[in-house]
Image (cartoon, rainbow, N blue to C red):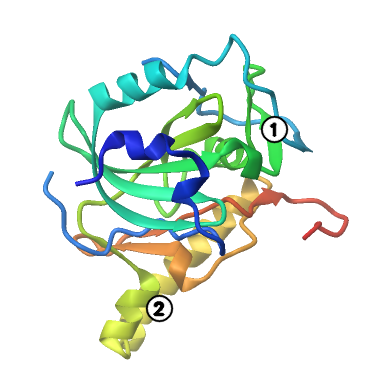
Amino acid sequence: MTALSDIFMGDSLAAAGPEPPLSCSRERTPGEGRPGALRGRSGAAPGPGPSADSRVPPAGKAQEALQERYRLGSPLGSGGFGSVFAATRLSDGTPVAIKRVPRNRIRHWGELPNGTSAPLEVVLLAKLSSGCASIIQLLEWLELPDSVVLVLECPERCQELSGFLAERRFLLEEEARGLFRQVLEAVRHCTSCGVLHRDIKPENILLDLATGQLKLIDFGCGAFLQDSLHPV
């Protein structure tokens, strides 16, 4: 089991390459920091975001708060934008995923309705937080001096759609239609909220093996819909 302190080891956790998908393909047994409000947002801006200052508690206090609330499990992936770990919420045994993104790798920031500055990924997830079961839910987020930590829902038994399709090799038409319908529901919800995912692929879709529910994940490349061309 990985120590929770590993989340705060800085860039050594992130190797070069694309951001890892949030996946949990095997079955699992069941503060401080600055938590963000999980509602809509009003605008985004490029750049490094707010600098660490007295508003952001020391990493040690935030780490202690996380240790009191979560037990960290195995790493799920790492890439150029951060690292993702399996974890368990201690209060009720709920499985979650904890994603750490170094501050210097957050390209775009936005603002939540309460005026809190937050990474655009947090702002997008907050805007999508209700109305669609096919979107991964952000449970909380914490801002540290050198990084941002996202706590996300993670079904106890789930698998990336890419891995599921590779194992099955083919699907019956009815089953494929049901899965594709859920993807369209997720896209429709994103569009209705003015959000563009920009990286929809089987690796960014989780399948709850117990219920058959799909979850669109990883909004790290996301943006708000606009009439003009979107920057790369």
Nearer the N terminus, badge 2 or badge 1?
A: 1
Q: Which residue is mark 2?
A: 177
Which mark is nearer the camera, 2 or 1? 1
Q: Residue furthest right?
A: 228
Along the line of sight, which residue is nearer the eye, 8 or 165?
Answer: 8
Along the line of sight, which residue is nearer the eye, 128 or 188?
Answer: 128
Q: Secondary structure at mark 2?
A: helix
The number of callouts visible is: 2
* Quadrant position of residue 42: top right
Q: Which residue is mark 1?
A: 110
In the image, 169: left or right of 232? left
Residue 144 rendering spot, x and y as whole percentages? 51, 25
Along the line of sight, which residue is nearer the eye, 185 or 101?
Answer: 101
Who's the residue at 77% across and 60% down the image?
Answer: 232
Who's the residue at 46% across and 55% down the image?
Answer: 217
Residue 128 rendering spot, x and y as whole percentages? 54, 42
